[in-house]
Image (cartoon, coloured by chain):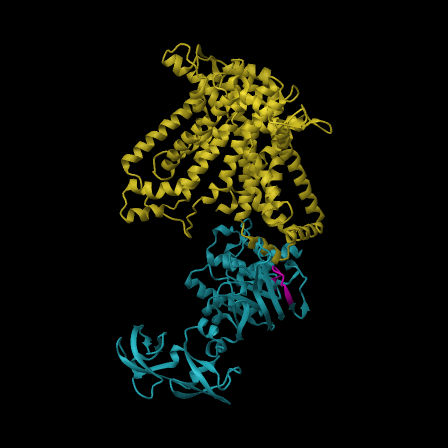
Amino acid sequence: MSVTLVKVTKIFTDQDDKSKEFTAVDDVNIEIKEGEMVTFLGPSGCGKTTTLRIISGFEKQTKGDVYIDGSLVNDLPANKRNSSMVFQSYAIFPHLTVEENIGFGLELKGLKKSQIKSEVDVIMRTMGLSALGTRQPSQLSGGQQQRVALARAIVTKPRVLLFDEPLSNLDAKLRDQMRTEIRRIQQQFGITSIYVTHDQDEAMTVSDRIMVMDKGRIQQLGTPFEIYSRPTNHFVADFIGRANFFSCMVKSVSDVVTVEVNQKQYQFPAFNKDVKAGKRATVVIRPEGLHIQKNSEQAFFNGKITEAVYLGATVEYEISVKGRTEPIVAISYNPVKEGLYKVGDEVGVTFDPISAHVIL
Amino acid sequence: MKQRIISSWHSFIQLSKDPLLLGVILLLLLSLVLFIIYPLYKVVVVSFQVNGAFSFKNFTDVLTYSNGYYLKALFNSLWMGVATAVLGTLIAYVFAYSLTRANIPGRRFFNLIATIPIISPPFIGALAVIMLFGRNGFISSTLLGMKNASAYGAKGLLFAQVLTFFPVAYITLRGVLESISPTLEDAAMDLGGNRFTIFRKVTLPLSIPGIASSMLILFVESLADFGNPLVLAGAQFPILSVQAYLEITGMGNFAKGAALAFILLVPSVSAYMLQKYWVSKKQYVTVTGKPTQSSNDVVSPKARWILFGVCCLIAFFIILVYASIVFGAFAESWGNSSKLTLQNFVYVWRVGFESVLDTLAIAGLSTPVAGILGMIIAFLVVRKKFWGRKFMEFSSMLSFALPGTVVGIGYILAFNKHPLYLTGTLLILLLNFIFRYIPVGVQGGVAVLKQIDPSIEEAAVDLGADSNKTFQRVTLPLMVPAFFSSLIFSFVRSMTAISAAIFLVSARWKLMTVQIMSQVESGRIGAAAAFSLILVAIILVAMAVIKLILRLKYHTTSSILSQ
């Protein structure tokens, strides 16, 4: 069951001052395939939750179209759309028991009592909630409430499952456990799912594809691998993981891009189509793509170590380089082999061309 | 401006798609205008008119009347309001601080003691003052052997008002002090402050908005109070609300009565507005994610015992008051013979049984209606957008600011002509009670709705419920506890109301409170005490019944959400 957004835009107007407008979602196009799990990832205020609420029907887009399973649902209210939401606050009905909460949607569909009971029982067993059926929501832990919310959403067999930052109220350990479980259940039932979060680890773990958003616009749409290793712009590279940015001049573009940095020429794979010869661009290298050795003429940059944090498996270095305001961040993944350096050491930084690429 | 008109037009169009909703809104707006705004408007119009023309003559008349007798009444009322506010708040603060911070023994007991005056008729204080300090008073005459002691005048009234209204301040201040996280005091202590410095620099400054709020509330309550001054003020110490009543029922001078009511209205409404729109917005909220635990060590052992002593003293006075009412009800003749008898109850049964039935009928009918209307208004105001929403919220809460005397005068001025001729009927009493106690339900309902996370209602919609089903299955059940507690409050207030109702009772429809007042006025103190006791007993039974329903049906005595 696919979900398609075509040129979806949402503009909010200020309640008191109608002339003040805020574009929360700006021209978003995406096609989510059947059974796929897509994450909307971005900082708060980037429009990810608004986009999700447009799909659920709680917000109406100012412009553009929403299709669920090929049919236009612009004018379909939330209660008529066959999508289920798992809310950030769980939104468990405080006056109903666990069973009644889970059975609420089935009851509204007019199912028979016995049928509701058996379907609720099945889902509770799948979710490990069997012992809690008659409990009041106030007697549940955070993780249990989360499970009830998820069970309530999937028991109605929705065509689309929507998650609005579902794990943000859980502690770190439970969060790791639940995100694996959410992924497992999503795959087990094969439900098309959209997952909103600002946590990149969460996005990496659960998603088939990630849609990175900022200021209402899609910044990049791709698999977790593509997003991390081939960010298309400065925002994505900076938001996902850590990255070093080096300003460069593009010399030529063919199958590879030739650029000049620090008076030396390098060749990188050409992923970004917008990079043109004769223009300035930026080289992006992740900290783990950099290596540290004795300083030398051949090194990419030479500098002095200003910080060295030994973590056992890895060592994180910050190297200050003359003429650069930002220090270079490098992670050594095999300190025993690569050698340890200490603060004050003069070192050279090198890299593998495969772990770098050029963006605008 | 144009855009505002367009958007209100749009919201109107939106509403017209839901005719039931539109009908309810229009009906409510109409009733609020008719039964809250219109009587008020009549008071203003009548007070500013002489022979149908605009004039200040009524005001110049009343202010110069009998060498400034009414001017003195105004001054007395204001003075009494300020004194009650200051003294009542001070006592309430000591009480609230001792109970929330000082860890004194017997906190449950003190809390109970402080809430008793809330459920009793407002003139019980006055009655007790007469029984304790009057000519035949237990303290003045029996203990001290004073002849011709007088309980009337400023001192007696102040005692009665402080006793009657300090619980209101106590509840306000307790809420404020409870919301101040004890960890702030712990932090201050950790930074090296001694206990008194902590109180002076942390606790007290954080409770200033609460103190200001409580003073303004007590000021409004004292100005509006009618029962206590009617019994105690006397001719030497005139009080505005009583004088307005006497002007109308004694002299039949509606214009002058309305002018006095208007003079009374100005400071009340000003203080109320100040409280609602300014002071209450200044409240500090100390937000913490987790429930905080305190070492509970901000009060030194010595100070704890001093506070405990003060609380005991206050509790002693309250107990003394109620003990004298109970004893007075059973005494053969208060101050003269302490022989116990049931003759007072027999007398009350004979002369007052009818008023008991009337009062029960009126309170029993008006309370649920006020509660339901309050919930509906709360729902509309919080969850719906429509033209007139602000007005609905404002006017439905306005009754809190209006002294009962003003409302009573407004009702007799507004509803004495066709087609709205209601004078002397049951309906005028019912309408008065309903619209006077609507704010209780609105306030409770709004508080609950603001606590319900909108996503709970969205979850129901998401699972396929339309707006009707969502309201029925989710919103309404969550509002039920608030509805019942608003029932308790408005029932208590209806049963003990007097200031507005005294203008509206008739030979056919009598109220217990008014009957009790006439017993006091004719000197039958014992009968008045017995009558008051019956009234309090009825209230206690009703409260117990409502709480029982709540516990049996909803397994809770408080809001489901507070768990």
Residue A208 visible, this orientation: no
Q: Nearer the viewer, residue B88 or A221?
A: B88
Which of the two residues, A350 or B290, is positioned nearer the viewer here?
A350
Which hue is chain B drawn in? Answer: yellow
Query: Does the magenta-highlighted stretch encompass residue A60?
Result: yes
Compared to B498, does B383 lie above or below?
Answer: below
> What is the magenta range?
A55-64
x 56%, y 67%: residue = A194
Q: Position of residue B81 (x, y in %)?
A: 46, 28
Q: Position of residue B11 (x, y in %)?
A: 66, 51
Left or right for B176, reference A104: left
In this view of the protein, can residue B59 be seen by the observer? Answer: yes
* Depth order, front residue of A29/B557: A29
For residue A1, side relative to residue A352 (left or right): right
Q: Is residue B333 above or below residue A354?
A: above
Chain that the image shows in cyan: A
